[in-house]
Image (cartoon, rainbow, N blue to C red):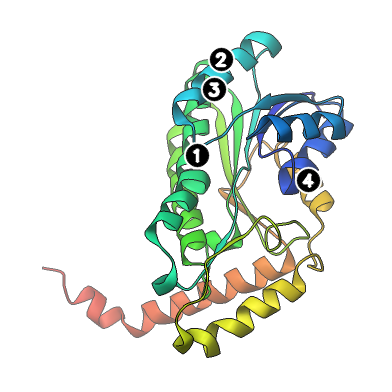
Amino acid sequence: MSKKTFFITGANSGFGLAIATAASTAGHAVIGAARSNAARTSLAESLPSLIPVELDVTEFDKISGVVDQVEKDHGPVDVLINNAGYGHEGVLEESPLEEMRRQFDVNAFGAVAVAKAFLPRFRERRRGFIVNVTSMGGMITMPGIAYYCGSKFALQGISEVMRSEMAQFGVHVTALCPGSFRTDWAGRSMVRTERSIAEYDKLFNPIREARQAKSGKQLGDPGKLAEAVLRLIESDAPPPQLLLGSDALELVSERIQRLQNEIDTWKSITISTDG
């Protein structure tokens, strides 16, 4: 495996920390971004071989400066792991728009802003790999995570366009779509809107309770996800999206089948609008 330089956002926890650990262990140079000085310090203590930097992906005007300094100090970055993000849980009617704005600022706008800081560098060098961490929630939905799914659907679509635009320059782009893994996504990292409308209790309460009960016991192993990412970035023909986890495979496959059934059922109406 050729040695590369990684830039990983949200590197102090979850998938970011797992990927940073695996890449460092494999001998790659890793620059890990964390959104606060405390998180950066903690990251440096966890992985002494890693180069920690402070970067809040919602401070859009500071991102280019951080990337400029990183490449000035440590040379060209080969792989961007756009991992920073969090989950929001809440019934749509109950959830304030400000919570949606914050969710999109981090999960969608922040990821795109970081990618845009690297795009000209990768284009000019005619090489590079961008891994945008979306979710199976960027391809399927379920009650209670509308803002989360919306932000990941947005990043999923943007990743496909980014891939098609950058392919001519030898730059790879893959959306990583994990299912349920043993991270803090459903635990301390999740923002939960306070419940206020009892009519949703029957639908939503069992979903929230099941998610909380499952937190920390999910089938997915973050360490194995990190190993999969290292295999992915070595590929000369990486996929537009990579599902990770048997639950992601099952649920996304079911959605594709439902979508095909809907297309077939409504085909006559669909084509009736031509002419």
Q: Nearer the viewer, residue 257 or 213?
A: 213
Whether the residues at callouts 2 and 1 have beta carbons within 8 Å, the answer is: no
* Residue type, label 2: Asp
From this view, report whether residue 195 is shown above or below residue 149.
below
Could you say where residue 25 lies in the image, as x and y percent from the top left? 89, 33
Query: Which quarter of the figure has residue 210?
Result: bottom right
Q: Which is more N-terminal, label 4 or label 1?
A: 1
Q: Which is more N-terminal, label 3 or label 2?
A: 2
Residue carrying label 2: 68
Q: Residues within 10 Å of mark 2 (few under 14, many from 20)?
A: some
Q: Nearer the viewer, residue 72 or 79?
A: 72
- Which residue shows up at 68% across the image and 63% down it? 186
Kindly report which numbered mark, 1 or 3, lies closer to the viewer in this rendering.
1
Could you say where residue 158 lies in the image, as x and y percent from the top left? 44, 45
Q: Residues within 10 Å of mark 3 (few under 14, many from 20)?
A: many
| Label annotation for residue 110 | 1
Query: Which quarter of the figure has residue 238?
Result: top right
Residue carrying label 3: 122
| Label annotation for residue 226 | 4
* Residue type, label 3: Phe
Q: Which is more N-terminal, label 3 or label 4?
A: 3
Could you say where residue 96 lies in the image, as x and y percent from the top left? 41, 62
How far apart are the alpha carbons under marks 4 and 3?
Answer: 23 Å
